[in-house]
Image: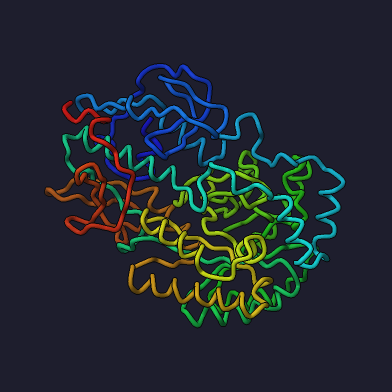
Amino acid sequence: MSKQFLEYFRCPANYVDFRPQGEALSDPGFFRVGPDLTCYGRVSCGHTSRDSFGPLEDVLSAVRVETSACILPFDLDEVVENLRFERYHGAMPVVRRSVAKTFGRKTYYALRPFLPTGIRKHLQRMALHGWDRALFPAWPIDQTVDRLFDCMMACAIRANSGRSVPFVWFWPDGFSSCATMTHDVETVTGRDFCGTLMDLDDAFGIKASFQLIPEVRYEISDEFLCALRDRGFEINVHDFNHDGDLFLDREEFLRRVARINDYGRKFRSAGYRSGVLYRNLDWYEFFDCSYDMSVPNVGHLDPQRGGCCTTKPYFIGKILEIPVVATQDYTLFHILRQYSMELWEHQIQLILQQNGLISFIVHPDYLLEERAREVYTSLLARLSQLREQSKVWIPLPRDLNDWWRSRSEMHLSRESGQWQIQGPESHRARVAFARLEGNRVVYGFDSEILPHEVPTLASSHLNPSA
């Protein structure tokens, strides 16, 4: 019940006691916690729904605080894993519904490298028709997992007689949030534009990772790899040959993943990203990478729908998942037909409120137009501003991976009346405190309050008199 909460906050275990209300009576399905948190799992009271449309049962009124324990009508660990691992698809496997090797899909991917962007975006808009009617995950950013943890933190504080709860802050050196930039290189033209793109990134002091397709699409010379690496940029493996078939057949996947792992060693890569964000998390055990960047936060505009509903990294077995949070540049420019910062700025503001991760995919292939470069330049300028004014950390993905792994081994201990952080890289970590102000959770370092907005949790729902 408490495992995922403790791993998320890295707080002392004696501050948390979540207990089940009783045996789960329902089948797995959708329900609500409060007015706007859609969850998926089993409940011990009320009922669940097979889909996220229509009215959903709100189980928040069944949450109770008794003595020092929080009594929950659902298994918090189960709900969080269902969301992060996209298990809310129910009987549908994680791989997209169109997994069959149909003639049309095979033809599209065979012709895709030769199709002009104008034809591709028209076909993709047709395939994505109706995406805006999807209610779950929430568009344009879904932070259900993070906000659910906030609600549970409010319960934990009340169960501790209102005392603040210490925990290891999410980001190093007191940074308020995190942003990271990545570039997926899809074509020869994109590869040849990488030098110009590095110049643009460097003009704002922002380093990025470049994901390279190892076979079929273009040649990757040792000189090209050295040029990226010598300038301080990161190199990762991007799929196998970007034909959309990586996860279609297990036997073929095992053959390809062995080659992918070989390329990872050749490129000296720590990370990996699948083509078109296709994924099957049940097969991730076969990757040798340290981290993956293939799971979207909300995937309404991707061929494989879904989303992990969080803006924080999390582990899939031994692999750290760094989710794709912001809308991709191709989607912004060619599907939504927006050449402005409006959507990205809206997403940035939502994520900053939750002290989360703002991760971007920007392709060199789609920055050839001047108006596209102007929007990307505005994004770099905005990130640079956030770094200076809002203390947003902008690391390479490999550095983010190293930090989150170190944090996962940290723990708090009480020494001479003060909380101390033990574990690797603990000198970069900060002790933070969660406390209630009215019915709102606020986070801060001692008396310093960090910018953070969480769902209001009415005290009557939590039995404050207990």
Query: Toward the viewer: 390 or 222?
Result: 390
Q: Position of residue 364 (x, y in %)?
A: 65, 72
Q: Position of residue 199 (x, y in %)?
A: 57, 82
Coordinates of residue 119 in the picture (x, y in percent): 79, 63
- Residue shown at 68% from the left, 76% from the top: 224
Residue 41 percent coordinates (x, y): 49, 29
Q: Left or right of 177: which side holds 15?
A: left
Quarter of the picture containing the N terminus is: top left
Quadrant of the image occupied by residue 446:
bottom left
Quadrant in which the C terminus appears: top left
**73 w.r.t. 246: above or below:** above
Which colouring convention does the figure follow?
A: rainbow
- Residue with the most extreme left position: 416
> What residue is rendered at 46% in x and 31% in y?
78
In the rendered view, would you say 398 is above or below 306?
below
Counting the numbered discs, the total is 0
Quadrant housing residue 208: bottom right
- 69 lies above or below 305: above
Residue shown at 72%/45% (left/top)? 247
Residue 421 vs residue 357, the one in the foreground:
357
Instruction: Name above or below for residue 30 compared with residue 385.
Output: above
**Relative horizontal placement of residue 65, taking residue 21 as reference (left or right):** left
Residue 291 vs residue 201, the one in the foreground: 201
Q: Is residue 19 left or right of residue 199?
A: left
